[in-house]
Image: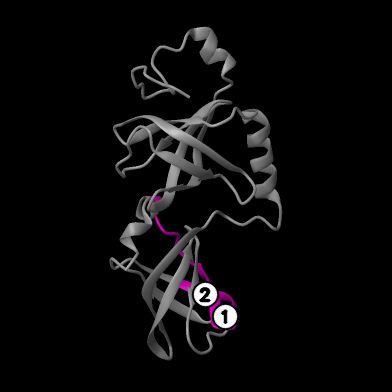
Amino acid sequence: MNVSRAPHPTGLTSDLADSDRRTSNRHCTVYRIAAVEREGDAGFWRVRNISDNGMMLAASVDVAPGERLQIALSDTARLTGEVVWAENGRCGVAFDAPINASELLKQLAAEQKASSYRAPRLAVRSHATIVTDEGSREVDVVNLSQQGAGLAHEGDLPVGTKLELILEGGIRRRGIVRWSRKGQSGVWLTAPLEQADLESIRRFED
């Protein structure tokens, strides 16, 4: 898709006719978080709106027109597109192929109500420290969500263990081990990580 029109913070381009805006079937999704992957980085960015042809994302990281993005709204809803404008912490993304935005939002709402729903996660490879009643030890963080962390470690880490997780950069959260097997564990964080802390996994990588 060739785009040479001026950027506009409320849509994909500034010169869309009013009729085009009406038929683009735009929906506000202010409170939805997407896991965005791009070359050399990934993070959680906020979805500000979505249409059949594109979406607006908000993040404080540097983004450039022409960047390719893979956008996961859930484990099953994944989109690809290209940044067509970026300014003031927001960017517009044109999808590689049109979607049915209305049906997609219905699907996402249904998924969130399901008992098997799992929030999007970011794949990370970083050292961290956990502190339990037994003392402190080093672990590897293999994935992060706002409410949880996947850990790889030596020895046992029993289900129900209460701990403090200290991430690279000094971010600290208390949590409880929800599952553990063969040197891997999942930790539920009692206070969620801030979305802004997870806009780029580069801050956590060694």
* Front residue of this view, candidates 61 and 81: 81
Going from N to C along the chain, the mark reached first, 1 or 2, is 1
Magenta-span inclusion, residue 176: yes
- Residue that label 2 marks: 176
Q: Quadrant of residue 26?
A: top right
The residue at 45%/34% (across/down) is: 82
Q: Is residue 143 left or right of residue 5?
A: right
User: Dot 2: few (<14), some (14–19), or many (≥20) neighbours within 10 Å?
Assistant: some
Q: Amino acid at mark 2?
A: Ile
76 displayed left or right of 17: right
Name the residue located 42 percent from the left edge and 51 percent from the top edge.
Answer: 43
How far is mark 1 from mark 2, CA to CA? 6 Å
Residue 173, given in percent of the width and then of the height, sits at: 40, 68
Would residue 41 be counted in the magenta stretch? no
Residue that mark 1 sits on: 160
x and y percentages locating residue 105 in the rendered image: 63, 35
Q: The C terminus appears in which quarter of the rendering?
A: bottom left
* Residue 92 occupies quadrant: top left
Q: Position of residue 147 (x, y in %)?
A: 50, 61
Q: Is residue 155 above or below residue 90?
A: below
Residue drawn where x is 56% and y is 19% of the image: 24
- Comparing 81 with 133, the one in front is 81
SS for callout 1: loop
Dominant secondary-structure state across the stretch colored magenta: strand
- The magenta segment is 175-195
In percent of the image, x 52 and y 82: which residue is there?
161
Q: Amino acid at mark 1?
A: Gly
Secondary structure beneath label 2: strand
